[in-house]
Amino acid sequence: MAPDSSARQRLLFQAATLDERARAAAREGELEASARAILEALDCERRAVGLGPQVLQLIKPRA
């Protein structure tokens, strides 16, 4: 498993854990804690997507 792949899996696992924490907090009526966990989970998902392969396309203008 490549280093990026393991880091990506770790971030996705952390996002899933935060999602469960958010659900539990919402059930308890702790809306602020739930909202914080949701935002942290979304940040983890965003960072996991950023670890994927980056493609750069260069377009040369025609003369």
Image: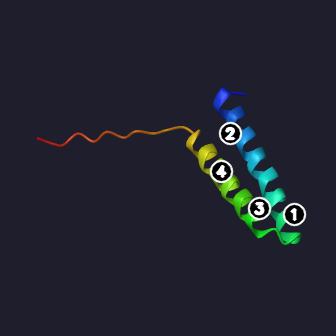
| Residue 26 picture location, percent across and down | 82, 69
**Helix, strand or loop status at disc 1:** helix
Q: Write the residue at 65% across / 50% down.
A: 45
Whether residue 37 sits left or right of residue 45 in the image: it is right
Question: What kind of residue is marked 2?
Answer: Arg
**Helix, strand or loop status at disc 2:** helix
Location of mark 4 (residue): 45
- Going from N to C along the chain, the mark reached first, 3 or 2, is 2
Question: What kind of residue is marked 1?
Answer: Ala
Whether residue 62 sits left or right of residue 7 in the image: it is left
Question: What kind of residue is marked 4?
Answer: Glu
Location of mark 2 (residue): 8
Q: Residues within 10 Å of mark 2 (few under 14, many from 20)?
A: many
- Going from N to C along the chain, the mark reached first, 2 or 4, is 2
Q: Is residue 16 above or below residue 54?
A: below
Location of mark 1 (residue): 24
**Helix, strand or loop status at disc 3:** helix
- Closer-to-camera residue (35/59): 35
| Residue 17 picture location, percent across and down | 81, 51
Q: CA distance from mark 3 to mark 4?
A: 18 Å
Residue 33 is marked as 3
- Going from N to C along the chain, the mark reached first, 3 or 1, is 1
Q: CA distance from mark 3 to mark 1?
A: 10 Å
Q: CA distance from mark 1 to mark 4?
A: 19 Å
Q: CA distance from mark 3 to mark 2?
A: 25 Å
Q: Write the residue at 74% across / 38% down.
A: 10
Camera-nearest label, 2 or 1: 1
- Closer-to-camera residue (44/40): 40
